[in-house]
Image (tube, grey):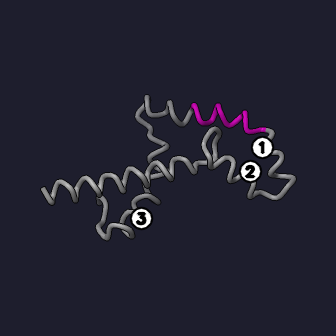
């Protein structure tokens, strides 16, 4: 029972980290787009916020790229999640 609980907690930590890093991708409607839009200096920030509707197309391309076997999202969110997972749990994740 202890092993099952430990493995379940590890899976929850990893899932939480993956969702957090996915949400920080700077494409609408994700929160990362709002964060980046507010962090940019004003001429760039307003341009970014006004042209954010163009990013919807890019988000669609990234999400639908998984249909072709090219997983762009995994390359963006897995490396930082793996690093933080190792720091929090103290165990390496994968090879």
Q: Which residues are magenta?
A: 51-60
Instruction: Report the front residue among 47 and 23.
Output: 23
Q: Quadrant of residue 84?
A: bottom left
Using the numbered discs, state the Cα–Cα distance from disc 3 to disc 1 in whole angstroms.
31 Å
Outermost residue, right direction? 43
Q: Earlier in the sequence, mark 2 or mark 1?
A: 2
Q: In the shown orientation, is residue 43 left or right of residue 24?
A: right
Residue at 80% x, 51% y: name it: 45
Question: Image height check: is 90 above or below 45?
Answer: below
Q: Write down the residue under mark 1.
A: 49
Q: In the shown orientation, is residue 79 left or right of residue 45?
A: left
| In magenta segment, residue 57 | yes
Q: Earlier in the sequence, mark 3 or mark 1?
A: 1
Residue at 46% x, 48% y: name it: 19
Asked if the residue at tag 1 contacts the one at tag 2, i.e. Cβ–Cβ closer than 8 Å, the answer is: yes
Q: Main secondary structure of the magenta part?
A: helix
Q: Write down the residue under mark 3.
A: 83
Q: In the shown orientation, is residue 41 left or right of residue 74?
A: right
Q: Residue 30, position in %: x, y? A: 60, 42
Q: Residue 58, position in %: x, y? A: 62, 35
Determine the secondary structure under disc 2: helix
Residue at 49% x, 33% y: name it: 65
Determine the secondary structure under disc 3: helix
Question: Image height check: is 48 above or below 4?
Answer: above
Task: Kindly report which numbered mark, 3 or 2, lies closer to the viewer in this rendering.
Answer: 2
Q: Write down the residue under mark 2.
A: 37
How many numbered discs, if any? Answer: 3
Q: Residue 92, position in %: x, y? A: 30, 65
């Amino acid at each position: 029972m202890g092993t099952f609980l430990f493995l379940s907690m590890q899976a929850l930590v990893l899932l939480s980290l993956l969702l957090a890093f996915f949400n920080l991708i700077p494409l609408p409607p994700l929160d990362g787009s709002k964060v980046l839009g507010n962090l940019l200096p004003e001429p760039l920030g307003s341009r970014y916020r006004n042209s954010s509707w163009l990013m919807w197309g890019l988000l669609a391309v990234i999400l639908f790229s998984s249909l072709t076997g090219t997983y762009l999202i995994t390359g963006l969110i897995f490396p930082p999640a793996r690093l933080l997972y190792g720091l929090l749990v103290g165990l390496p994740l994968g090879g």
